[in-house]
Image (cartoon, rainbow, N blue to C red):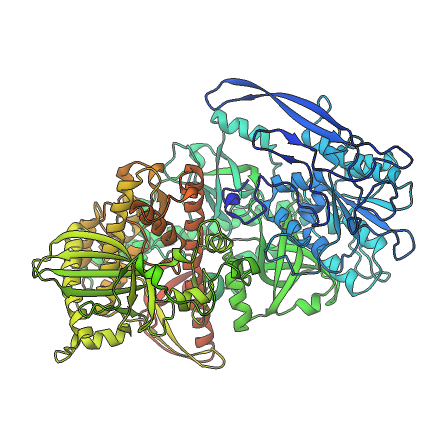
Amino acid sequence: LPSSSSLLPPPPHTAPPPHQPHLPPPPTTSASGRTDGRTGRGGGGGRGGAVSQLAMRRHRTYIRRTKRGGVVKVVAEHYLRNDIWCGSKLCEDCQHEPGQAILPDKGKGGTPVYLVLDTNILLHQADVISDPAFDTHCILPQTAMEEARHRSIPIYKRMYELMGHGEGEWKGATKRKLWYVFSNEHHTLTYIERESKESPNDRNDRAIRVAALWYKAHLEDNADIVLLSDDRENRRRATKEGLTAMSMAEYLKKRIPDGAAKDRLTDLLAVPGDGCDDGGDSGLDIGGKAGQGRVKERRLGPGSAASFMYEEHLPVSKAESLIKAGDLFKGTFKVNRNYWKEASVLASGSSFKTPILIKGLEDMNRAIDGDLVAVALHRKEKWGGSREVLLPVGEMGAEEIDETEAAVTKEREEEEEEEEEGTNAKKTSNKKKMKKKGEEEEKAARKRRKIGQKEKAEKGKKKGEMEVEEQEEEGEEDVKAIPTGRVVAILRRKTRAYCGSIELNARSQSLNQGRVNFIAVDRRIPKISFVSRQVQALLDKRIVVQFDSWPRNSRRPNGHYVKTLGPIGDLDTETIVVLMEHDIPTAAWSPAVLQCLPPEDWKVTAEEAGRRTDLRESAETCIVSVDPPGCTDIDDALHCRVLPNGNYECGVHIADVTHYVREGSALDNEALNRATSVYLVQKRIDMIPSMLSTDLCSLRSKVDRLAFSVFWEITPEFEIVDTKFAKTVIRSRAALAYGDAQKLLDDPDAKDDVAIGLKRLNAVAKVLRQRRMDAGALTLASPQIKFVLDSESQKPQDAEMYQLKEANGMVEEFMLLANISVAKRILRSFPSFSILRRHPKPAEAQFDLLVRAARVVGLELDVHSNKKLQESLDKAVIEGFPYFNTLIRVLATRCMTQAVYFSSGSTGTEEFYHYGLAAPIYTHFTSPIRRYSDILVHRLLAAALGIDPVPTNLESEEKSRDMCAHMNHRNRMAQQVGRSSAALYTLIFFRERDVIENAIVLSVRKNGIRVFVPKYGIEGSIALEKGGGGESEAA
């Protein structure tokens, strides 16, 4: 199961298969492994037979190996009974309670049709059976549901919700499916034992066929029982045993009347993988009028593109054994964002410190970005360098938007045109040789030019002149051969539904229907081929397509259409694309979540205030908040007052979100699933409902709010002599924007309580900041663009770089101090499961390209430690080039590793260090409205202070690890969404205007340059074309 499966709301991975509310619950398995069949009730096991309440007990014995290598014999009890209901209104023997029989006694043609669904139908055709147009009554064998549960939690959860259970996005998305889940694994007449030499999959297929045969006999052929399976061998055996068996494509063709519903379901039809039908290329006529919509059989002939064959994948079991023996390496397949025919695999447990490079389609062997693969190394003489850029440009999450329409390079288009035209192997081979020869000649020419460039450099370059071409050549000499390999097995696919648009190909039969190519917004995904009956309607639209399979003899993977999002370029449509591509939950709050909220007239009661430190009436404690303009989810507030002994008391007050979000509640589960609020240019997607995020938890001015506070006693010499924590009730005096706070700091005549408090806080903050810098903390930069939006259309009217003020730094210093103080406190109480945040030190090799780039302009960067790096960055100044220091800090930021959440018991204390902040220990405490990690830390701090019990879900090392991994993923996606949203608005802003601005060249690639525009803080690519003289020139 996926590591995050335990984080999902019900059904958990230990839950029984879902049933209709009016069905008897299925037999369940207790924690001890005992299977209890006594919960089944109802009528007999066949017509004409006596009704029996007898429960039979079976014993299953097997041997398993323990973690320490021992062998244990396990005996599991399995109960069978013959009184499990069939769920059909046709049956007179099963004593259904009123409303329990849901399968109809009549069909549209008289005889009702019951579809028995195989596991592969649930897994691969979920889009078809979930659609409202698919209204046939279905029987879901327990075997199929359990297998689907173990193979895909999302699919199982989807089926569960479609039957009216749970509170997810599929409940209410369509009408509730009248599906009957039949407990065939506990019926005396349908339970089967696994035979000798029979695989688990074959046993399950046979169990489903036995269930279908039982229904046929039980209902005495008064219903049309159809086994629906995309497994050819399963259908062949079913037919031989006397069943009617069809694939999904065949069922849609023969049983669904022509019309819009059939066309829609046909578009949703998935193309199964190995061992199943190959869908659109299988020669099936998928319906429609004569000669329309027919997908003809594709015959493979010499010289055709279809004759191409990838290397066959090893069976997973064999690949795993070779990995264990050290002959293969396992890791996640990561495609180069800048070059789609190159990928890398960081082998777990490998002796290689760098990822294994996978170059070319043949070596990639049908792997998709994110797949878990097995890799075989090439011989060392075949190792080589990458086509990666020489200056780091980082993962700009926004590239999915600003380069969508130009995602496929000219080289890619030429290659794919040749494939469509059937370029034969010999011609392709000759082209590769000519291409290689051309590349060698080009490299030789560059080396000849290098001599002249070096002579020019020795005569002296002007300061600030960046000789990027020389940098490139120096970089090429320094590049060392890195391990290369090829994919030999796909251990686990990580495919999903992708957003993008279509293009017509040579096999598109018309503008109404045919096979088309799908170009994903994510440039790392290859084109996906699928069949559609609505080609004309899909042109110029953003659509969603699901990856299905990738046969050996196909240049491209197969997929199927899922839905249309809207017109390309439309602001709302592109925003939906950004959110879907980054897996951001956007469903409406469920009724169960809303029920967890307090009443609308909630107020702080005297009883609650009595349990807290009440700061509302303290005249000397002037609490204020300082946030970005327009902020409504105010997490934090501050104060600073003078104590009677002459010391200062500084306080940070954080919204007490855990007072409302109780552990284990539906609200808590949803907050964990979302893990973070997501900020787009035009809106915010909250982690918790707005009643909390913008009202009861938001520390607005002049209203009573619950808080969790940290207090420091600081001497006039700025030494911290005491730290305290308390749950409080506060009333903020003012909610200021950064600009307003800055005006008060700059105004010497401002002497009211708010201004005095801010100036004291700022004085302390300056000292705290200097001490962090002295310890080695880094001052980096990340350009942010700020838009002025039209109030009605939300379109950008103006754009500029976001300017940080001194007030920003003041708030930041106290938030950092609070996070560090809380981290120390919770670790002291819970050394084995505190939730902390660390920033691993980057490997010095990650700075190599930046160091070489700095040398081009005569600067040396020392990257041996964070303190040395900070000192080098402070000296990185070029006269006449004021933005250079900011630029070098931006590039240094992109060399960093990602800061991550972790459980203190999962790693040694030496790994706790936060490299960027130079902090030995750190956590997140100050933003519980928008980060779930902070909610966990609040619970830990409350438990450490004896206020609340220890959080139960943190005591398990596995759960803590899974939650941290989940939060890291959501946090990373939220950051990328923010960048992508800014890039989308940048594209829309400049689409309607031409602006000429100065730009800085960041990197030179083989087919273009990457530039940065300081005024707007944006980055983009400029393509290079061949000029008349054969040299590359800017387009």
Report whether 498 appears left or right of 246.
left
* Residue at image coords 41%, 68%: 694
Q: Say if 556 sits above or below 1027 in the image.
A: above
The residue closer to the viewer here, 246 or 521, is 246
Quadrant where the N terminus lies?
top right
The residue closer to the viewer here, 454 or 643, is 643
Q: Give the quadrant of residue 133.
A: bottom right
Image location of residue 806, percent across then percent down: 21, 69
Report whether 385 appears left or right of 885.
right
The residue closer to the viewer here, 597 or 357, is 597
Image location of residue 222, percent across then percent down: 91, 45
Quadrant where the C terminus lies?
bottom left
Q: Give the quadrant of residue 81.
A: top right
Report whether 847 appears left or right of 335.
left
Q: Give the quadrant of residue 164.
A: bottom right
Report whether 27 appears left or right of 107.
left
Image location of residue 910, percent across then percent down: 26, 38
Question: Is there any visible trace of residue 193 in the rendered image?
Answer: no
Q: Say if 207 sits above or below 360 in the image.
A: above
* Residue at image coords 25%, 76%: 740
Question: Is there any visible trace of residue 451 in the rendered image?
Answer: yes
Image location of residue 973, percent across then percent down: 45, 56
Total label count? 0
Q: Say if 220 sits above or below 1009 in the image.
A: above
* Residue at image coords 82%, 34%: 237
